[in-house]
Image (spheres, rainbow, N blue to C red):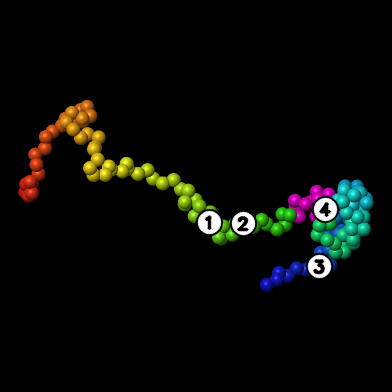
Amino acid sequence: MAKYTPFSDNAVLTEFGKRIAGSRLNNNWTQAELANKAGVSKSTVEHIEKGQSTQLLNMVKILRALGFLNQFISIIPELGPSPMELLMQSKNLQKNKRKRASKPKTKASGQANDFDGPGEFPAGIAAEPKAPWIWDEDK
């Protein structure tokens, strides 16, 4: 649904032309001087100030010369990332996320342990001979 605006297209162009002319006069420039600074013809400046249609590139050049290009560009907001781009970014973040530290893996059976023989226990730990375990001994 289109929004209601009180201005016709021609009325908008006329108002825009008046504002361009006012800005030019505030800078104390002639139409020829503005045209020279913008890199367009004097007749292009005349057309714009009369509210006549012109190419968008010529309008950009004139707005740049008058110092209004940033305001013109900021009329339409920048687009944010699309939903698919957000999804891909979150997947990349999860993929690169630091994993938790894990315990060292145990050695495979049949390989020697760090403390295999008698006298190989670290200081402070005494080697105790163990009795063989018997089934149901603890009952």
Q: Is residue 67 magenta?
A: yes
The residue nearer to you, when weighing 97 against 43, is 97
The reply to whether dot 1 and dot 4 touch (C-beta < 8 Å) is no
Q: Residues within 10 Å of mark 2 (few under 14, many from 20)?
A: few
Left or right of residue 61, residue 73 in this image: left
The residue nearer to you, when weighing 78 against 95, is 95
| Label 1 vs label 3, nearer the camera | 1
| Label 1 vs label 4, nearer the camera | 1
Residue 26: x %, y % from top left:
87, 49
Left or right of residue 112, residue 40 in this image: right
Identity of the residue furthest to the front in this view: 110
Kindly identify which residue carries mark 1.
Answer: 88
Kindly identify which residue carries mark 2.
Answer: 80
Label 3 vs 4, first from the N-terminus: 3
- Residue 2: quarter of image: bottom right
Residue at the spot x=79%, y=51% of the render?
A: 68
Q: Secondary structure at mark 2?
A: loop
Kindly identify which residue carries mark 4.
Answer: 61
**Is most of the magenta stretch helix, strand or loop?**
helix
Q: Quadrant of the N terminus?
A: bottom right
Query: How far, Cα to Cα, is label 3 from label 4?
Result: 21 Å
Q: Tell me where the magenta segment starts and ends, as one range.
A: 60-72
